[in-house]
Amino acid sequence: FALTEKLAGVQSGLLVQTQARYDFATEEFILSTPSPGAAKNWISQGFTADKAVVLADLTVGEDRKGPHAFLMDLRNNGQLVPGVSVGDMGIKTTGNDLDNAWIAFDNVRLPRSALLDAHAGIDAQGNYTQRTKGISPFEMIGQRLYTGRVAVAQAALSYCRKLFEVTRQYADNKPIWSPFTRAGEAQPSLSSIPQLQSLYGEAEESL
């Protein structure tokens, strides 16, 4: 899935500079990387994948239609298709066993059928039609990305709440020694330590 680009920065997934220009004569899209900053970055399996879904800014005639998704061959028989180049993203702070590549395109031609056209398409006469009214194809893609990120955040919050619950339960039931405990009295719990009480109070308010 080739979406992120080098110079997108904090707008990763929102800024797409890779270009796809429609050639009416051949009924093909010409996919190109106009500058080094437009190269696709951090693409998982970029060194091994045979196919990719590439997000590119579509131009039909003189009209820019915005980012659209294209399904294309990256490799045939293990070899990169002409016009496609890849490189290693380099050493990372962690996860160096993962395959992360940058990908660039030099006037790679794609058939008209390469456009993923559930929401917008181009017919044999070169007419562009938006099938889903009121929302662009890229906004549809963005919705899926957004809901995925929300789901990850919600899962992390649920995990955090459960971790706090288990930790608090352990501290409440963990007896500790105290020089102030008299004979026959129950030992205080770990959670009675003032510093932990303060931390637990903050956690209960925020979680």
Image: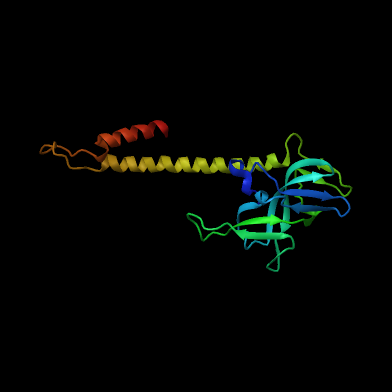
Q: Indicate whether 183 appears above or below 6.
A: above
Outermost residue on the left side: it is 183
Q: Quadrant of residue 138?
A: top right
Q: Position of residue 137 (x, y in %)?
A: 72, 42
Instruction: Answer yes or no: is residue 45 visible.
Output: no
Which residue lies at the image location 65% right of the left edge and 52% below the top edge?
40
Q: Residue at x 46, y 41 (%)?
A: 158
In-front residue for pair 10/53? 10
Q: Is residue 184 left or right of residue 147?
A: left
Q: Is residue 104 visible?
A: yes
x, y (%) of residue 52? Answer: 68, 56
- Residue 130 image point, x, y percent: 79, 40
Q: Nearer the viewer, residue 101 or 34?
A: 34
Report the residue at 30% width, 43% height from top: 170
Q: Quadrant of the C terminus?
A: top left
Using the image as rendered, state which of residue 68 and residue 30 is in the foreground. Answer: 30
Q: Quadrant of residue 143?
A: top right
Q: Residue furthest bottom?
A: 77
Q: Is residue 91 left or right of residue 168?
A: right
How many discs mark residues in the rendered view? 0
Which residue is the extreme one toward the top?
A: 205
196 sits to left or right of 158: left
Which residue lies at the image location 74% right of the left edge and 34% below the top edge? 134
Residue 122 image position (x, y, % from top left): 83, 46
In front of the other: 143 or 79: 79
